Image: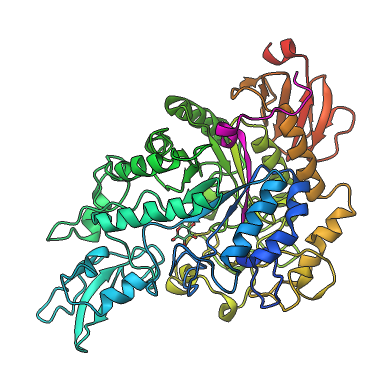
Amino acid sequence: MAAEPVLLPEATWWRQAAVYQIYPRSFADANGDGIGDLRGIISRVPYLAELGIDAVWLSPFYPSALADGGYDVADYRDVDPRIGTLAEFDEMVTALHAAGIRVIVDIVPNHSSDEHAWFREALVSPCGSAARERYIFRDGLGEHGEIPPSDWDSVFGGPAWERITEPDGTPGQWYLHTFAKEQPDFNWDNPEVREDFLKTLRFWSDRGVDGFRVDVANLLVKDLPETLPSRAELDALDRDSGTHPLMDRDEVHEIYADWRAVFNEYDPPRTAVAEAWVDSPVRRAKYASPDGLGQAFNFDLLTADFDPEAFRRIVTENLAQSATTGSSSTWVLSNHDVTRHATRYGLPPLGDRKGVKQGIEWMIAGAPADGVDPALGLARARAATLFLLALPGSTYLYQGEELGLQEVGDLPAEARQDPAYHRSVHQPAWSYDGLGRDGCRVPLPWTSSEPSFGFGPGGAHLPQPEWFGAYSVEAEESDPASTLHLYRTALRLRSTLQGAETLDWVETPGTALGFTRPGGWLTITNFGQEPVELPVGELLLASAPVENGLLPGSATAWLRVPDAAASA
Ligand code: GLC
């Protein structure tokens, strides 16, 4: 059993790293404009260091009109003036590195903002010009080109094509936007686009960035014939074949091979993790190839119920897949796109929710509401997190989950910013509740009493509910049983326990699931309601009080057991 922290060799630091996602606009606001900023992050480096994470991943902080929370990038090689400056970025990297925390930034290559200089140039340039060739422009159908080139929907709802006005003032061509209309898709067949992204990767790598999170990595390459397939035709196509016209095409990996060559120019090589919502672990593994991005998010647990069979199957499948590429698995329960897991786990099981009335009833506003049980959600969230942190591979944590923060379900419509909400109000989109993604992006509560709960001196860009104070860092600091203390202890212990990237399942009672890691680190999660008896061993940590050797329902315990007993 290793007693000392296992110091991961530099070049492989990412393999079992705990990475904390910062959504910069909602983390900490130093200048009081209601939007989080780099100075805010710098001021919280001691907090991050105490939390015990290995790296931070920053969602976009680039200049942006915020049509999609910053995922509409107007300039890939600058900082939004509301968030900071390049000099402050450098200062932040230095401060984080000095605290032993690596830095991952978000790269958004499928689309830019419609305010990007290239798109503006395209709008004032003629049809067929080099400027238009950087994006995907098409003539419309119909006598006057008034019908969009195809009937495709955008991911956020509504049509995927937007018509422009030509420089001479006449209605003109249409451009493709897989997401909001302010996010025109790049044409990745164009070498200029490819070159520009290599430049961006070098730009941030030169500034000391350790890695990249690659936004919708599976969508870049498209095969768009003269006559486009209809939505119905697209829906009928196999998404897993590598030949779908719009997603997960095999050729996309040629791009990532070029990126890998850039990453390997650096010492240690820069890392990358693909956000690729593909259908199977087999397809996902392609993104995680060492000749490509090296790692890919695995969202399987995030989209599963709190259920031992599902957890076991998902872990087994994904460990097997990552072994085929030599990558490490990744584990995620929350991020800026989904309902926070402390709330999600308080909802009825997914199967029971399909087709039922969706909306505010499913969310919480500080107290149990119909259909949601925040106390159960939190207990399960704590249990699931300890389960996750014990797995081989790296874990991605989302800001606020270390506080057990719940989703804010009752944001007024006029306060909501998410285009997924506004473009598809009438259908569930991008979260289980159909309310969009603002509820997990509400600025963090740092204190229980100050205005904006210590987020900043000038209010918060999304309204914080009154009950946020109870989840604040300040409130949780003084409560030894808080989720914050659980995360801190777990992360610290984890760094001493992590060893070889393997696990063995152990025999457990029906509602429980257990596994050991080399060195005798045993994890038992009780997915049921009735307590289960823990095996003999030294109790290291539990997500709920263990009495008389009994692990309560919806809880996880970590134990140290003799190695032989672990593998028996
Ligand atoms: C990714 C991001 C999401 C964004 C979308 C379009 O899925 O995580 O927040 O809206 O891509 O860039």
Residues 217 and 73: in front is: 73
Q: Is residue 431 left or right of residue 407?
A: left
Magenta stretch encompasses residue 128: no
Residues 170 and 342: in front is: 170
Quadrant in which the C terminus is drawn: top right
Taking 554 as reference, is 176 above or below it? below
- Residue 211 in picture, x, y percent from top left: 52, 46
User: Visible in this render: residue 362?
Assistant: no
Taking 538 as reference, is 198 above or below it? below
- Residue 107 in picture, x, y percent from top left: 46, 55
Quarter occupied by residue 189: bottom left
- Residue 351 in picture, x, y percent from top left: 52, 48
Quadrant in which the N terminus is drawn: top right
Which residue shows up at 42% across the image and 48% down it? Answer: 277
Count of all numbered marks drawn on residues in the image: 0
- Residue 349 in picture, x, y percent from top left: 58, 48
Which residue shows up at 18% across the image and 80% down it? Answer: 146
Taking 556 as reference, is 164 above or below it? below
Which residue shows up at 80% across the image and 66% down it? Answer: 469
Q: The magenta stretch spans which residues?
A: 1-22
